[in-house]
Image (cartoon, rainbow, N blue to C red):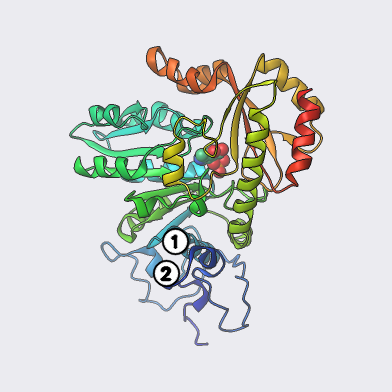
Amino acid sequence: MELFQKPEPAKPRKAAPTLRPATAALNGGLIPNPVTGAIQPDISMSVNNVFAPGSAGFSAEGADLADLPFLYARWTNPTTRALEARLAALEGAEDALTTATGVAAIAATFLGLLKSGDHLIVSEVCYAGAFELATRILPDLGIQVTPVNLSDLEATRAALRPNTRLIHAESPCNPILRLTDLAALAALAHEAGALVSVDSTLATPVITRPLDLGVDLVIHSLTKFMNGHGDALGGAVIGRKELISALRARSGVYLGATLSANNAWLILRGLDTLYPRIRTASANAQRLAGWLEAHPKITRVIYPGLPSHPQHALAQAQMALPGGMIAFQTADPQAMSHQLADRLQIIHYAFSLGHQRSICVLIPTEDIQTSTFRMQGPALARYRDWAGNGLFRLSVGLEDPEDLIEDLARALG
Ligand SMILES: Cc1ncc(COP(=O)(O)O)c(C=O)c1O
C-alpha cells in the first residue's frame, strides 16, 4: 500500500441495492482490511493520520469532511466511518454522523439546523433530555419552540408557522409509547417547507425505517437497542448526504461530542446481532404484555402489539414488530416501585433500555412533570390519560420469557 493512501475499510459504502436489511445489519459498508484481510472492523485509535500535503482540501467551500483523507479524529475516524456506513445501510440512507451520546445527536441536529428566529415543533412527550434541551436551552438562543401532540395532525398543522424549520418526533415515544404517523407528518411538514427528524431509538430500523416514510433525519441513541449490550454510549443522525454533510461541518466538528473508536467498535459488534435481538425482545415483550394485561395487580398495559393500544392500527401499519418496550400501571405506583426493586431477581430495577437484560423503572408522573414537561390543562390531562400517576417502563431483554413472567409474578405478589 502506498504511503498516504486512505485505507479502504473506512470508505463509506451504501449497501448494494439487493442487500436485505437483516444482511445490511451485518455487511453494510463492511470491507475486509486490504492489508490484513481482517473481516471484523479494526479499532483505529490514532488521533491523527499522515497525509500528502495539498491533498486535504479542507478549505474548499462546501467540501464534505467525510470525503477528505483521515486527518484528525474529531472530524472523521476509520472506525466511526465504518459504523456510519453500517447505520446508513440499515436505515436506507446516504450517510450518517455518529456522536458521543444520543443526546449529542439530538443537540447536533437542533444546533446544526436551527438558528435564531427559526421555529421548532417538538413532540410534547419525548425523551426528557431532548425535551429539556428544546424548551430550556434553545429559547435562550432566539429559537422559538412549541411542544405539540404530534399524534394529532390537526394540532400539528395549527402549530406551523412561516418560520417553522424542523419538527422533531419520537415514535414510539418514551415513556408513554404513543405513536406518530410518520408518513402523514412528513407530508404535512414538507408542504410547509419544514424538515422532520425522528428519534427512532425505541423502534430501530428492524421495526420502522422512517426515511422510507419520507422523514428527513433519523436519530438514534445507539446506547440502547442498536448496541444492545449496555456497555457503550453513542448516538447517530442519519439521512441525505447534503444534510449529514452540513451537520458534520457544523455540529460534528464544533460541538466536539465525537464518538470514540472503542465505542464505535462495540456498537458495530452489537449491530451484528441487531435483527435476532430485536426479534427475540419483541416476541418476549408480546408474551409479557399479554400476561401483564391479565394480571389483577396491573391496571393498564400500553404496548403497540396489544389490540388495547389506542393506536394499534397505526402500529400494525408502521411497525414491522411491536418492539421490546412495555409501559404498565399499578395502584399506588410508589409503593409498587419499592416492592419491585426489592423482589425482582432477574429483571433489573434501573434506568436505560434496549439492553440484552430486562430493565424496569417507575416514571412517576408528578416527578417528570416537575422536572421536564411542566404541562398544564389539556396537555397534562392527555399525559395522565396515558400515564396515570406513574408508569412502569419495562424494557424486555433476551431472557426466557417464562423466567421473566415468574420473576414478575413473584415481585407483583
Ligand atoms: C428515545 C431516547 N432518545 C435519546 C436518549 C438519549 O440517549 P443517550 O443516553 O445515549 O444520550 C434516550 C435515553 O434514554 C432515549 O430513550
In this view, 153 is above or below 286: above
> What SS does tag 2 mark?
loop
Q: Residue at x 21, y 31 (%)?
A: 161
Q: Position of residue 131 (x, y in %)?
A: 44, 30
> What SS does tag 1 mark?
helix
- The residue under label 2 is 14
Q: Are marks 1 and 2 in contact (CB under 8 Å)?
A: yes
- The residue under label 1 is 88
Q: Residue at x 49, y 50 (%)?
A: 320
Q: Position of residue 289 (x, y in %)?
A: 63, 35
Task: Give the mark nearest the N terminus, 1 or 2.
Answer: 2
In this view, 393 is above or below 97: above
Q: Position of residue 363 (x, y in %)?
A: 60, 24
**Residue 16 as seen in the image, left or right of residue 183:** right
Question: What's the amino acid at mark 1?
Answer: Ala
In this view, 236 is above or below 110: below
Q: Residues within 10 Å of mark 2 (few under 14, many from 20)?
A: many
Q: CA distance from mark 1 to mark 2?
A: 7 Å
Question: What's the amino acid at mark 2?
Answer: Lys
Q: Name the one closer to the observer, 166 or 326.
A: 326
Q: Residue at x 44, y 15 (%)?
A: 381
Residue 258 makes an appearance in the image:
no
